[in-house]
């Protein structure tokens, strides 16, 4: 059992786009949040998505995971068309196993222990046996450095520990791609590093990741590519270090300067 899950290691071609989206548009009434966004992520690649609040970053992730439907465009996850207006329950179930998502606010069940939080979905969605689910949960808790927290409850953990539990919970589903929606934004500054270190380890082990983040150093050092959004559009994208060290657009230069001053 690997950190990134057996399915990806055994069956994924590294030249394949695990995620691709083309001309995606999303509106909330008269407000257009995504304006013809296109992009892709290959197997084992880390794409950092940056931009000011309200630019569409989180909405894009929620559309990719079918937590939101889109108004037009196309989204493919591991070759599966997930942007069709009506997605069957079988396809939606498959999507939930292919794509893991880590939110800002952890979303752990407070009345369940850490171990119970990790074993619930594998048993109910993947039909894993209780023993296999527990073994897998202990494995990933070890990988995120929380082996001794299995029997504790979320409110007994720090914010950074809860976020690492949330990462381990997603890994228990053996996803092909992980989506991170500003996973450190709700954390105290001294807890950010432990979560970023866990994510860096995932990247080093070849997990395909899309990360919405304001942690520019993490994006520059860990991500392969970066995508800068502004007002629902892709303004600049490319090699993470090149784009962040030598931005070509005035909008990105202004955004990065504001972050440095903050």
Image: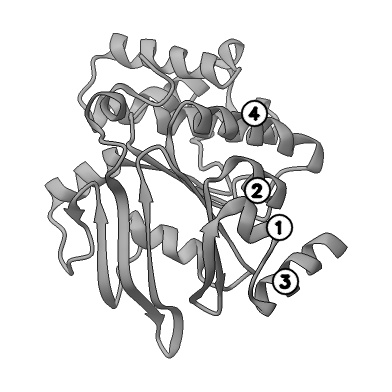
Q: Which of marks 4 and 1 precedes in the sequence?
A: 4
Residues at badges 3 and 2 in contact (C-beta under 8 Å)?
A: no
The CA distance from mark 4 to mark 3 is: 34 Å
Residue 175, visible in the rendered structure = yes
Camera-side mark, 3 or 1: 1
Residue 77 at what x, y percent from top left? 26, 51
Name the residue carrying label 3: 253
Numbered-mark total: 4
For the residues labelled 3 and 1, the Cα–Cα distance comes to: 10 Å
Q: Secondary structure at mark 4?
A: helix
Is 27 on the left or on the right of 167, as rendered? left
Answer yes or no: do the residues labelled 1 and 2 have beta carbons within 8 Å?
A: yes
> Where is residue 170 shown, x and y percent of the image?
42, 34
Q: In whole angstroms, how far apart are the C-alphas of marks 1 and 4?
A: 32 Å
- Closer to the eye: label 4 or 3: 3
Residue position marked by numbered label 4 in the rendering: 161
Q: Toward the viewer: 243 or 145? A: 243
Residue position marked by numbered label 1 in the rendering: 245
Q: Residues within 10 Å of mark 1 (few under 14, many from 20)?
A: few
Q: CA distance from mark 1 to mark 2?
A: 8 Å
Q: Please report whichever mark, 1 or 2, sits nearer to the chain's N-terminal start.
A: 2
Q: Position of residue 160 (x, y in %)?
A: 67, 33
Mark 3 secondary-structure assignment:
helix
Q: Nearer the viewer, mark 1 or mark 4?
A: 1
Mark 2, residue position: 220
Residue with the most extreme bottom position: 30
Q: Residue at x 33, y 29 (%)?
A: 174
Helix, strand or loop under label 1:
helix
């Amino acid at each position: 059992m690997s950190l990134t899950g057996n399915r990806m290691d055994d069956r994924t071609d590294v030249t394949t786009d695990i995620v691709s989206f083309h001309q995606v548009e999303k509106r909330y009434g008269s407000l257009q949040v995504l304006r013809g966004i296109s992009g892709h992520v290959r197997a084992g690649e880390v794409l950092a998505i940056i931009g000011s609040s309200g630019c569409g970053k989180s909405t894009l992730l929620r559309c990719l995971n079918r937590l939101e439907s889109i108004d037009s465009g196309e989204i493919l996850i591991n070759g599966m068309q997930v942007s069709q207006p009506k997605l069957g329950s079988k396809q939606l179930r498959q999507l939930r196993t292919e794509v893991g998502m880590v939110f800002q606010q952890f979303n752990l069940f407070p009345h369940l222990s850490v171990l119970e939080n990790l074993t619930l979905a594998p048993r109910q969605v993947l039909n894993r046996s209780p023993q296999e689910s527990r073994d897998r949960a202990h494995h990933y808790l070890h990988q995120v450095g929380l082996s001794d927290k299995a029997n504790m409850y979320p409110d007994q953990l720090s914010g950074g520990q809860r976020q690492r539990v949330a990462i381990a919970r997603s890994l228990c589903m053996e996803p092909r791609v992980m989506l991170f929606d500003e996973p450190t934004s709700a954390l105290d500054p001294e807890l950010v590093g432990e979560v970023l270190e866990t994510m860096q380890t995932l990247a080093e082990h070849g997990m395909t990741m899309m990360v919405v983040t304001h942690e520019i150093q993490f994006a520059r050092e860990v991500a392969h590519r970066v995508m800068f959004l502004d007002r629902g559009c892709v303004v600049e994208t490319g090699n993470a270090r090149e784009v962040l060290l030598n931005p070509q657009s005035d909008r990105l230069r202004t955004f990065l300067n504001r972050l440095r001053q903050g």
